[in-house]
Amino acid sequence: MSNKNKQKTIKRFNKGFIISHWVNAAAFFVLYISALPMYTEFFDWLYPVFGGPAGARLVHRIAAVAFMLPLPIMILLDLKGFKNWMKNIFSWKKHDIQFFKEFPKEFFGRKAKVPKQDFFNAGEKANSWLMIFTTLMLIFSGLVMWFPQNFSQGVVMWAYPIHNIGLGLAAAVVVGHIYMSIALAKPSLRGIFKGDVTEEYAKDHHGRWYDEVKEENKKKHA
């Protein structure tokens, strides 16, 4: 823990996790923008940005490779953080279910009694699963579209609608994630930029994790 600008902070993410997050975000943004003119003529005006249709396809494929890197980056640079993420998203308990009962009240500005949450709260756990699901849809359908000669005609035909649906769902997840981060939990942005958050934020939004950290610190200084 440290004291910066008179506010005590607590370490939340290591550099490996942060790098993985931003590689994922940047790759998705480039994929989305480069895909728009290939999806509908309405966005043909974007082609000059990439130097034409061939350039857009090339950029899209480069971004596709980058889109597959966040997981290995996290495993290589922050294995502990990866294991903690896996542990959290596979852990669903009573306080997670209660979170979804109370969260709508908080979302609409009403007083809510959200129970203490883990390192990742129930909303972040759900977001993680949606991200995993849509990422798998995009990667596997994208690989089929990229190398159609290696798959049957039926598989190739299914890959296109799956890719489109995956893109739509992923875009919705991203928009929701950004809105939540900016509108409802703005202090959380410090964590994904600098790696730490204020103790006040940790206590309010990740109480169970905050209590664990405090208890560990007590044992260290006992």
Image (cartoon, helix red, strand yellow):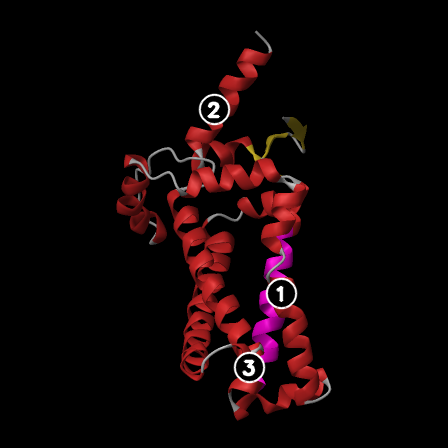
Query: Residue tagged by mark 2?
Result: 212
| Distance of label 2 from label 1 (alpha carbons) | 34 Å
Sooner in the amino-acid sequence: mark 2 or mark 1: 1
Q: Residue at x 41, y 57 (%)?
A: 130
Q: Which residues are magenta?
A: 20-37
| Residue 21 visible here | no
Q: Quadrant of the N terminus?
A: top right
Q: Residue at x 70, y 88 (%)?
A: 48
Q: Secondary structure at mark 2?
A: helix
Whether 10 is among the magenta residues is no
Q: Position of residue 201 (x, y in %)?
A: 50, 37
Query: Residue tagged by mark 3?
Result: 149
Q: Residues within 10 Å of mark 3 (few under 14, many from 20)?
A: few
Q: Residues within 10 Å of mark 2 (few under 14, many from 20)?
A: few
| Residue at far right of view | 51
| Distance of label 2 from label 3 (alpha carbons) | 53 Å
Q: Residue at x 64, y 39 (%)?
A: 14
